[in-house]
Each structure stands twice: as C-alpha cells, then as structure tokens.
Amino acid sequence: MKKLLLGTALVLGFGSYIFWSSHNSEPVTVPNLVVDATTTEPIPAVSSTGSNDSSDMVALSGQYKDGTYTGDVASTIYGDMQVAAVIKGGKIVDVKMLKYPNDVENSLEISNHSLPILKKEAIAAQSTKVDIVSGATQTVEGFQQSLGSALAQAQS
C-alpha cells in the first residue's frame, strides 16, 4: 500500500511540475524569417498529380511566373497556416508567413522552430517538398498545402 501511495504521489508531483513549467516559461518571439535564397544547385523536375492532397508536391521546373502569390489558408488542428511565395527569375526566392499557429505558447514555440526551417527547405527544393520537422507535422502539412496552392498559381 505504501508503494502505491508513493508511486501515486510521484506521478502527481511529476505531472504538476510538467504543467507548471509549461505555463511559466518566458514568452517566445517569432524570429525574422528572412532567408538568403542564393543557390547554385540545379532544379530537378517533378510533376504533380493535381489533387488537393497535402502530400502532393507541386511541379518544380524553375519556370514559375515572377510575382508574389498568396496561397490558400490551410486549416490545421492548431490553427490556420497561410504563406505567400515570392518568385523572381522563375524561382522561389522568398516564402512569407502570413498566418501560422500562434495562439498558445506551445503552438508559437513550434512555429518559431519549424517555420524558418520550412522556408529554407522550400527555397532550396524550389517546391513544397520539405522534410517533416519533428513535433510539427501539422504545421508542415499546412505549410505544404498553402505553398502548393501559391505555386500552382505561379506555374507557367
């Protein structure tokens, strides 16, 4: 009986600590998401299936029309995600984060960590083909969906 009470006390104590520490940390700020887009790597060609599935990758031919294209809002369980793709010289040179999950501290921390990575990978890949960031699967899928719709508008 003593072991059961001790175990229960330890579990409750640990759970209380986790709850307290997750609600009493310093505020997180969103970093400047500017990434240098200079790349000398060739752009591979990939085709899209054309469906609305978030796992589909938009074609990357290096033949996007120049301009800024706003993607559709992608709803995730943690909040809306929307990006704008900036195209110059037929290539993605910037991805602007217009909406992202940030209404609770945990979502803000995940966005703060994952969005700069996703932006850099999308520019390097010249497509929506980015790696899943651990702990940010929903954010990645929303990013891919919104960027995919922006790039579909930019295709020549």
Image: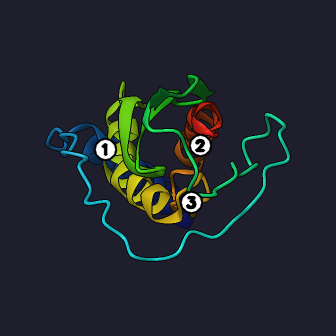
Q: CA distance from mark 3 to mark 1?
A: 29 Å
For image coordinates 44% across by 48% down, the residue present is: 12
Which percent across, then down, holds residue 64? 55, 45
In this view, the residue in front, 85 or 64, is: 64
Three-letter code, disc 1: Ser
For image coordinates 28% across by 42% down, the residue present is: 20
Q: Which residue is mark 1?
A: 22
Mark 2 vs 1, N-terminal side: 1
Residue 133 lies left or right of residue 55; in this view the side is: left
Name the image quarter holding residue 152. top right
Residue 148 lies left or right of residue 79; in this view the side is: right
For image coordinates 52% across by 42% down, the residue present is: 139
* Colour basis: rainbow
Three-letter code, disc 3: Val
37 vs 31: above or below: below
Tag in front: 2 or 3: 3
Which percent across, then down, holds residue 115? 38, 48
Q: CA distance from mark 2 to mark 3?
A: 13 Å
In this view, the residue in front, 30 or 85, is: 85
Q: How many marks?
A: 3
Q: Which residue is mark 2?
A: 138
The label on residue 130 is: 3
Name the secondary structure under disc 1.
helix
Which percent across, then down, holds residue 29? 18, 40
In this view, the residue in front, 131 or 63, is: 63
Q: CA distance from mark 2 to mark 1?
A: 20 Å
Q: Residues within 10 Å of mark 3 (few under 14, many from 20)?
A: many
